[in-house]
Amino acid sequence: MQKKTISEKRFWFQRLSKTSLRALHILGIIGVGGGILLGVDKVQWFNYWYLAMTTGCILMLWEIVRDWRWLIQLKGVLTIVKVGLLSLFVPLANFKPELLVAIVFLSVIVSHGPAGLRHYSIVHRRQIDSKKEIKG
């Protein structure tokens, strides 16, 4: 099987694009988190909500298109769990701070956990390697 390589220019474009998206996503999360945790009126932080949701969806789509196995690896499964927790913001509105803390906790596990945890497949019950990632 032949390995597919990308040009250095394309690599840097993809790397910087993903890093920029992630930075915007974190900015959105900070704005939303501050608004929720400090009880600030929604009008003041709702633009951050849109930013976080838009960039989060783009980052998820990026991963799924890159390699569908992301969906069965813990990094994808835990991201989907985070989306599920977000959906509880409406029926459990009084628990938004607690839900937000749980989401941030899961985010840290996904982002900073060892590869053996992030790449663990819930289907195969072992670590599976995916296509070459563009970090960011």
Image: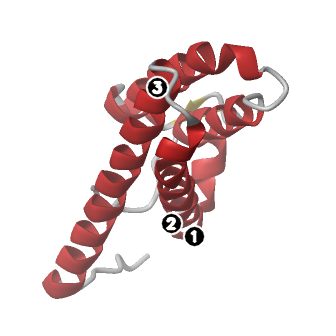
**For the residues bearing labels 1 and 2, Cβ distance under 8 angstroms:** yes
Label 2 amino acid? Trp
**Residue at 37% in and 35% down:** 111
Kindly identify the amino acid type of the residue bearing the numbered disc 1: Val
Question: Which residue sits furthest left?
Answer: 8
One can see residue 134 in this view: no
Rendered image: mark on residue 65 = 1
Query: How does the figure colour the protein chain or chains?
Result: secondary structure
Q: Name the front one of labels 1 and 2.
A: 2
Under mark 3, the amino acid is Val
Front residue (pair 81, 2): 81
* Residue at figure coordinates x 55%, y 48% from the top left: 46
Which is nearer the eye, 106 or 74? 106
Left or right: 73 as drawn, with respect to 35: right
Residue 92 against residue 64 in the figure, above or below? above
Residue 21: give x, y in percent of width and height.
Answer: 36, 62
Name the N-terminal-most of marks 3 and 1. 1
Observer able to see residue 114: yes
Q: Which of the numbered marks, if any, corresponds to residue 62?
A: 2
Q: CA distance from mark 3 to mark 1?
A: 24 Å
3D distance between C-alphas at marks 1 and 2: 5 Å
In which image quadrant can residue 117 be found? top left
Residue 104, which numbered label?
3
Left or right: 117, with 98 as reference point: left
Helix, strand or loop under label 2: helix
User: Does 72 sit above or below residue 13?
Assistant: above
Query: Quadrant of the rendered structure where residue 112 is?
Result: top left
User: Does residue 64 sit above or below 5 in this rendering?
Assistant: above
Q: Earlier in the sequence, mark 2 or mark 3?
A: 2
